[in-house]
Amino acid sequence: MSDFIVDNLTKTVGEKTVFQKISFIIHDFDRIGLIGINGTGKTTLLDVLSGVSGYDGDSSPFSVKNDFKIGYLTQEPDFDDERTVLDTVLSSNLKEMKLIHDYELLLSNYDSSQQTRLEKVMSEMDALNAWEIESQVKTVLSKLGIEDLTIKVGTLSGGLRRRIQLAQVLLGDHDLLLLDEPTNHLDIHTIEWLATFLKNSKKTVLFITHDRYFLDSVSTRIFELERSGLIEYQGNYQNYVRLKSEQEERDAALLHKKQQLYKQELTWMRRQPQARATKQQARINRFHELKSDLSDTTLGNTLEMNFETSRIGKK
């Protein structure tokens, strides 16, 4: 295990800069909630981190070990429809998972002629202590309501296909899980189980969700995408709300000071030129910088106020 380091990541789609020179570090066992108003690029960021989508520039913004593995729960699963549920869920190259796959397959199609093969597989599982993993596989499949492992995934509904993809990601041998709306198509009891599973399994997770309670329960850090940048907050969603409010109060106080200074300097600028000595050129330059800064700040505050209520949840 190692840190996943992102340094100066930029992504442009068409003429829009989705995020610009953002930097952050994902540590082992972090559970990070990724939030932001619609259109800020949350899914795009997961696409870039997973390698599904590219990034701007020639040099890689990522610093990570060579064999770092990422599991990605997308909003639209991409499966081979001819494969069975068993083949899809237990598709990891991990030897233990291959043995569990063979074990489950032999059990589902058991007859006496396969007894020798079954005993060999069980013996290999004993040698690798794979029974604990097998128990976890059974638990995950059961909790997600996946029962028939022999059916082809192409015959399943969209909701069940998403559950199968979730099981595949949770059971994979990954260093980092990227989860895009993991609670979709899950009932409240399954969502509660998933939250507990992620907290107890010591997995490193970066996830998007509109379920505020899930976000509050699972997250240890919050990443907020805003105006092409990324801001980090420590703690869960409640901590984020408190820290965000405190920051907005500080920003408001600073903005008020700048506005008062601007009024003062504007009065000075409106005087006749002879009332301003040429040696005050530095002060004139600072006035124009202050005017530009206030213009940008006011625009940012307006956008924030207009979209604040759509940040989390549908209400």
Image (cartoon, rainbow, N blue to C red):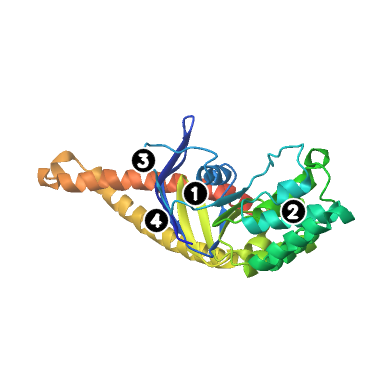
What amino acid type is highlighted by mark number 1? Glu
Residue 280 visible in the displayed image: yes
Contact, CB < 8 Å: mark 3 with mark 4?
A: no
Mark positioned earlier in the residue sequence (2 or 4): 2
Mark positioned earlier in the residue sequence (1 or 2): 2
Query: Which quadrant holds residue 52?
Result: top right
Mark positioned earlier in the residue sequence (3 or 4): 3
Residue 217 visible in the displayed image: no
What amino acid type is highlighted by mark number 2? Asp
Q: CA distance from mark 1 to mark 4?
A: 19 Å
Query: Which quadrant holds residue 80?
Result: top right
Foreground residue among 57 and 231? 57
Q: Nearer the viewer, mark 1 or mark 2?
A: 2
Q: CA distance from mark 1 to mark 2?
A: 47 Å
- At 28% across and 45% down in the image, what residue appears? 289
Foreground residue among 315 and 251? 315
Kind of element beneath mark 4: helix
What amino acid type is highlighted by mark number 4? Leu
Contact, CB < 8 Å: mark 1 with mark 3?
A: no
Q: Which residue is mark 2?
A: 102
- At 45% across and 61% down in the image, what residue appears? 2
Q: Which residue is mark 4?
A: 255
- At 63% across and 67% down in the image, what residue appears? 201
| Horizontal side of residue 141 vs 92, given as left or right | right
Q: Which residue is mark 3?
A: 59
Mark positioned earlier in the residue sequence (2 or 3): 3
Mark positioned earlier in the residue sequence (1 or 4): 1
Residue 302, above or below 15? below
